[in-house]
Image (cartoon, grey):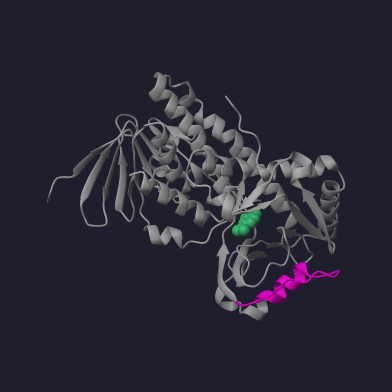
Amino acid sequence: MAARQIIKTQIAIMGAGPAGLMLSHLLATAGIQSSVVEVRSHKDISETVRAGILEHGTVNLLVESGVSDRVLREGDRHDGIELRFNGDSHRIDFKDLVGESVWLYPQTDVFMDLAARRKADGGEVHYGVTDPAVHDLEGKPKVWFTDSEGVEYEIQADFLVGADGSRSHCRFQIPEAHRKWYFHEYPFAWFGILAEAPRSADELIYANSGNGFALISQRTETVQRMYFQCDPKESVAEWDDERIWAEFRRRVNGNGFELKEGPVIDKMVLPFRSFVHTPMRYGKLFLAGDAAHTVPPTGAKGLNLAIHDVKVLFEGLDSYYGSGSTALLDSYSNRALDRVWKAQHFSYWMTSMLHTVPGTDDFDRARQLGELNSVISSRHGRAYLAEAYTGWPTTTT
Ligand code: DHB
């Protein structure tokens, strides 16, 4: 067998999702080399339907670091959302409350922009690799992999970044004595659809109803994205279009509001859980994005957290290569986790406020409406939601 081809670089990155590619791009802007390894093909990643809401900080980073300004041209700025319960909609006006907005711009497009920028800049990204394995995390890290042509490689790097998603290979290489895992399970999941229909509203609608939660989101003028709370064991095969729309109507329609319906062109069940791996560093390995944490989808924090992680990690690596100081690398895990736990709380809070827990009683239902009323009837309550939804300022130390 031929010997492994050696690639020498500064940062080896496992995973070419938004976190891995964004980091590789930021490093390139500072003249720091990286090599990215990804098991999925470019086509596979670009065809996966994911969430669609970007915080203003995520948008700023994409634009200001030179990835692309397509988000500003083709994304939709949203200055608020609607909370719908007891048959009425209540607007949370982000602009008025905290002076910020979010952008509706699907994660797939973020990936396409990042992948195109890395390609145009000559970035080294190996898609569709097999058998990736990491070694020597405490010394001089190495990544072994076989590329899509069957050639075996060894990357030698100063640092390794595990941005390899929720089933992270990297995370599992950290010895048990050096990590703590936090889990929370939820008794439901989301049934997500793409439908060919016009927009039902200008902004997203988060609906709490006695029949369970529903979220009315969007994609384009003619394709919409929507979700309803379902059992985690739900099977998409048992849901035809008529049954799906009947479920949405029960949860959202009323008091003069009617959803615009159309053919369902995609359907899937999305799992729901909270997970955090701490600390987000072991030796020369740094974890980023879903490899270190998962949030439930309510509030769309997953991608935004991943981008925040790599922004903070980039500052640490840039400072290390610029001045030799490890201070910012040493504070990476704490700085990233500060936001991760805020987002865990926000996602959990939005979930518990808006979903129906199976088997709950009249007290729980009435209490939940009391909670929703306390949020919408107070400027402080609305501002708390608006600040979290649009994204907290980044902590500086
Ligand atoms: C979308 C997904 C979310 O989880 C959310 O909170 C808002 C929007 C989406 O896919 O559009």
325 over 180 or under it: above or below: above
Q: In front: 65, or 110?
A: 65
User: Is 257 within the magenta?
Assistant: yes
Residue at figure coordinates x 82%, y 49% from the top left: 371
- Which quadrant of the render holds ligand 1? bottom right
| Lateral position of residue 251 relative to residue 60, left or right | right
| Lateral position of residue 334 relative to residue 213, left or right | left
Q: In front: 78, or 355?
A: 78
| Residue 332 shows in this picture | yes
The spot of residue 30 in percent (x, y) is: 41, 31
- Quadrant assignment, res 344: top right
User: Is 87 within the magenta?
Assistant: no
Magenta-drawn segment = 244-263
The spot of residue 376 in percent (x, y) is: 83, 49
The spot of residue 329 in percent (x, y) is: 46, 27
- Quadrant assignment, res 95: top right
Q: How many marks?
A: 0
Residue at figure coordinates x 51%, y 55% from the top left: 109
Residue at the far left in the pictured view: 1
| Residue 278 shows in this picture | no
The spot of residue 213 in percent (x, y) is: 72, 62
Residue at figure coordinates x 59%, y 39% from the top left: 340
Residue at figure coordinates x 65%, y 64% from the top left: 227
| Lateral position of residue 42 relative to residue 220, left or right | left
162 over 264 or under it: above or below: above
- Quadrant assignment, res 195: bottom right
253 over 152 or under it: above or below: below
Which quarter of the rendering shows the C terminus?
Answer: top right
Q: In front: 220, or 88?
A: 220
